[in-house]
Image: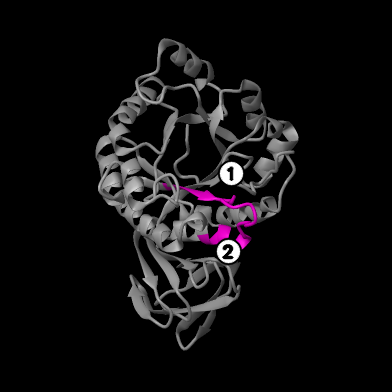
């Protein structure tokens, strides 16, 4: 059973050479909670379970119609395995396929109610950022991304919306726009927002920096994302994964480990929060966000407003340099009428207080949580 009060971090692609105990321990140590799209491999599932890692099984359901007798036997064979979190029923369907996926999701929930039917959607640019707008819309099967997401919510009965967006293979502005679209749909339909981000790169000579990993995750959290999946752990698509073709750690391992543990450090605070709104605070601008007054920054910031049972909170992402070209530190100031605690990149810090105003320093691409004590 999936604990929806827990912040999960997943990854795609676990090659055969990365399924022994040493590699799975490394996976767990990196902060990974589940493998998406894992083929039905009992030995691997046993090893995952030993280290407390889960799996979304793939390859045991048809792409469209309800599972056949043979496939249901395969599902029955693995459904009771403690490492199986759910069944990966598809990836990036067009809107014309939503009705079929709805049928498949209902079949999984009816026959295996403790397992999640996991389905991931397109971003606004379709399968590849290099596609023309017309080709991307042909893949989506709708007039635009908003209609694509709206049609999904009206057709497929899930309590989440999961989609991928690889901003460093496309552009940051489109990524932020998609976050607005999906978070709005989640808020309107009472669903959780899940997102697939990139740890690898679409060109061989580019490596995604630690700051770029942090900005992807932090900006997603500002819009209320409750689950993050990283692509890819081993070779699946593109280049510069976490493990190379020999199963050796690349530079991405420690980078991803650092960011994952920062996310986990604030997850207990973040998960009970309800996302209310997200705004873009431009450099030199000033605004009020809920009970947080005179909010100002010396750089562009993404500001998410959240409510929980005890207090009102903010989650801020430093958007001054999302491509990580010139790392630095920027300052956010604000006024509130109650004491707050602040976490920057997962670590609790003491904000500066002067003339009834708080001041918080946030590094390039970093994220901060501001919440009542």
Give the crowd class for mark 1: few <14, some 14-19, many >=20 residues within 10 Å: many
| Residue at image coords 44%, 27% | 114
| Residue at image coords 37%, 55% | 178
The structure's colour scheme is: one colour
Residue 194 visible here: yes
Q: Is residue 91 above or below residue 172?
A: above
Return the mark for residue 232.
1
Instruction: Say whether residue 206 is left or right of residue 174.
Output: right
Instruction: Say whether residue 98 is left or right of residue 25.
Output: left
Give the crowd class for mark 2: few <14, some 14-19, many >=20 residues within 10 Å: many
Measured as percent of width and height from the top left, residue 122 is found at: 39, 44
The first of marks 1 and 2 along the sequence is 1
Query: Does residue 201 belong to the magenta stretch?
Result: yes
Q: Which residue is mark 2?
A: 345
Measured as percent of width and height from the top left, residue 273 is found at: 41, 55
Measured as percent of width and height from the top left, residue 324 is found at: 58, 68
Q: Quadrant of residue 276?
A: bottom left
The residue most toward the bottom is 355
Q: Quadrant of residue 151?
A: top left
Return the mark for residue 71.
none
| Residue at image coords 73%, 46% | 249
What segment is highlighted magenta in the picture? 194-215
């Amino acid at each position: 059973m999936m604990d929806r009060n827990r912040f999960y971090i997943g990854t795609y692609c676990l090659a055969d050479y990365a399924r022994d105990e040493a590699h799975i321990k490394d996976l767990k140590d990196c902060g990974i909670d589940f493998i998406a799209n894992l083929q039905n491999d009992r030995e691997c599932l046993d090893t995952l379970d030993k280290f407390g890692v889960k799996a979304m099984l793939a390859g045991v359901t048809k792409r469209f119609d309800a599972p056949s007798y043979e496939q249901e036997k395969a599902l029955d064979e693995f459904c009771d395995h403690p490492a199986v979190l759910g069944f990966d029923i598809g990836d990036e369907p067009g809107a014309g396929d939503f009705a079929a996926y709805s049928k498949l999701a209902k079949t999984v929930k009816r026959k295996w109610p403790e397992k999640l039917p996991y389905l991931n959607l397109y971003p606004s640019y379709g399968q590849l950022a290099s596609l023309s707008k017309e080709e991307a819309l042909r893949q989506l099967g709708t007039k635009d991304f908003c209609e694509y997401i709206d049609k999904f919510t009206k057709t497929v009965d899930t309590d989440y919306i999961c989609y991928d967006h690889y901003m460093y293979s496309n552009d940051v502005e489109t990524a932020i726009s998609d976050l607005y679209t999906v978070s709005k749909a989640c808020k309107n339909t009472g669903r959780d927002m899940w997102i697939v981000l990139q740890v690898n790169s679409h060109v061989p000579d580019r490596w995604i920096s630690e700051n770029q990993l942090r900005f992807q995750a932090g900006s997603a959290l500002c819009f209320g994302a409750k689950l993050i999946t990283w692509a890819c752990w081993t070779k699946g698509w593109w280049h510069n994964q976490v493990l190379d073709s020999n199963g050796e750690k690349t530079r991405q391992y420690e980078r991803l480990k650092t960011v994952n543990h920062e996310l986990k450090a604030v997850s207990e605070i973040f998960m009970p929060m309800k996302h209310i709104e997200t705004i873009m605070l431009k450099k030199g601008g000033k605004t009020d966000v809920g009970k947080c007054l005179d909010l100002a920054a010396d750089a562009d910031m993404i500001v998410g407003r959240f409510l929980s049972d005890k207090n009102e909170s903010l989650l801020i992402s430093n958007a001054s340099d999302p491509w990580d070209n010139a790392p630095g530190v920027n300052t956010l100031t604000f006024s509130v009428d109650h004491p707050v605690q602040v976490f920057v990149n997962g670590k609790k810090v003491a904000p500066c207080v002067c003339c009834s105003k708080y001041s918080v320093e946030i590094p390039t691409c970093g994220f901060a949580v501001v919440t009542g004590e």
